[in-house]
Amino acid sequence: MAIATSNDFWTSRMNASDPSNLSGDFNDSWTLSAGSALDGAVSSTEPFFWEITSGNGGQTWRQTHTSGAVTLVACFKFVTAPTSGEVIMAIDNGTYKVEVKSKGANDKLDLVGATTVTTHDLDLEMGDGDAVPIILRLTLDASGTARLYMREIIEDDDAAQHYLSVTGATGSTAEVLWGNVSGEIHWATVYMSNKGSFDPDEMDLSDWATNTILQTGIGIVQTLKDSKRFYLNTHVQNSAIRYGYDLSSKMISRIKPPSIHVILQRVESPEFLAMAGTNTDQRYEIMLYITTRGTDYRNAYRLGASIAGEAFDEIYTTLGLKGGVDSLISYDAVLDSKLDDDEVVCVHTMRFVFMKKISMLRRQT
């Protein structure tokens, strides 16, 4: 996992606007490489889309890049499905390329690299009740691994892999493409990053969510998993270090102790640092729940304290010393005690407060 850093961002952000004239800072516009300017326009009613028809050859939008790893996210709906085999999204890094192709229908797409795989059923025309436009995330890394994520889901409710994966075909020109030359597609959003190949847990469409849940919450989970400190490396299984989406007793009991649950508890920005609000100091409150179990409560207590100590050392030395950008400014810990004769589970809690300097110039427009 390579969670987006403070220097990684969406280098191109199109939200139902003219792709050739994107507004805002650090926002690269697209070039019309095929088709006609006459076949694209912003819809006149909500919800807003960039509507591409095909009366004059449709539209294919292009950007070149110099990155070996690229992410392209598109949110759209089919009004009329493009011709079977037509490319609607593509990434080429000069060595490898991957394409998303229409199947001439409203329920499936192909992911095409060196091999071809087909999606499960998708509601591309928004025919179901309360339907929303499909979100597709296409990624290609420097080694040629390509993935297609649907609806920003990595695993389904049964913990089964929800994305498609292929090895890229032989590439030629480092470029990113999207659009349609037949049929009619209404494009709500197209985001691109030439900063890397990011899955939904590594870079969110929202910069705020990336800064908070991903970089600070899931980022700490990954830091603890990567640690080579004795207890974190040998006693706590990677599967038992996780972000605490569900802290109910039923869910926590499914994880064999010792375990560590990380949760982002609170975010605040005491003040913006410029009159125009271009930078902020944001504070992030992180909670760690270190759970151990033992009939001899003293042993569970001591093991939990040792694990908590290593977690503190790892977080402080790895994440908390980036002065001026990302610093640990305070912490406190509450050590659990046995209060009931039948109690065998010990839960030590730790609270960390980080202060990060955040640029507000790379927001969505």
Image (spheres, grey):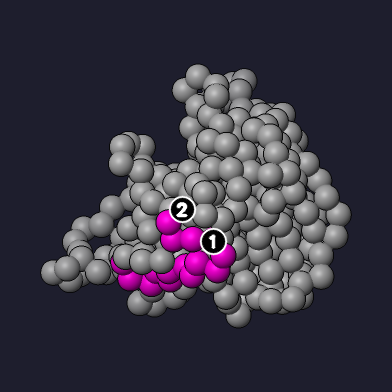
Q: Residue 183: name its quadrant.
A: top right
The quadrant holding residue 90 is: bottom right
Residue at (56% x, 56% y) in the render: 57
Q: Which residue is mark 1?
A: 35
User: In this orientation, does residue 79 appear?
Assistant: yes
Pick out the residue farthest to the left: 275
Q: Amino acid at mark 1?
A: Gly
Instruction: In the rendered structure, find residue 39 and report the number of the disc placed on it.
Output: 2
Q: Residue furthest front?
A: 56
Q: Which residues are magenta?
A: 24-39
Q: Does residue 30 show up magenta in the picture? A: yes
Residue 261 appears in the rendering: no
- Compared to residue 324, the image places residue 216 above or below, namely above
The three-letter code of the residue at mark 2 reads Asp
Label 2 neighbour load within 10 Å: few <14, some 14-19, many 20+: some
223, above or below 51, in the image: below
Disc 2 to disc 1, how far (Cα)? 8 Å
Whether 325 is drawn above or below 264: the answer is below
Q: Is residue 127 left or right of residue 7?
A: right
Q: Position of residue 138 (x, y in %)?
A: 64, 55
As for residue 301 lying within the magenta part, the answer is no
* Residue at x 80%, y 58% (from the top left corner): 113
Instruction: Please provide percent x and percent y for residue 112.
Output: 78, 54
Locate residue 32, reporting x and y percent: 50, 67
Residue at figure coordinates x 54%, y 43% from the top left: 184
Extreme-right residue of the structure: 115
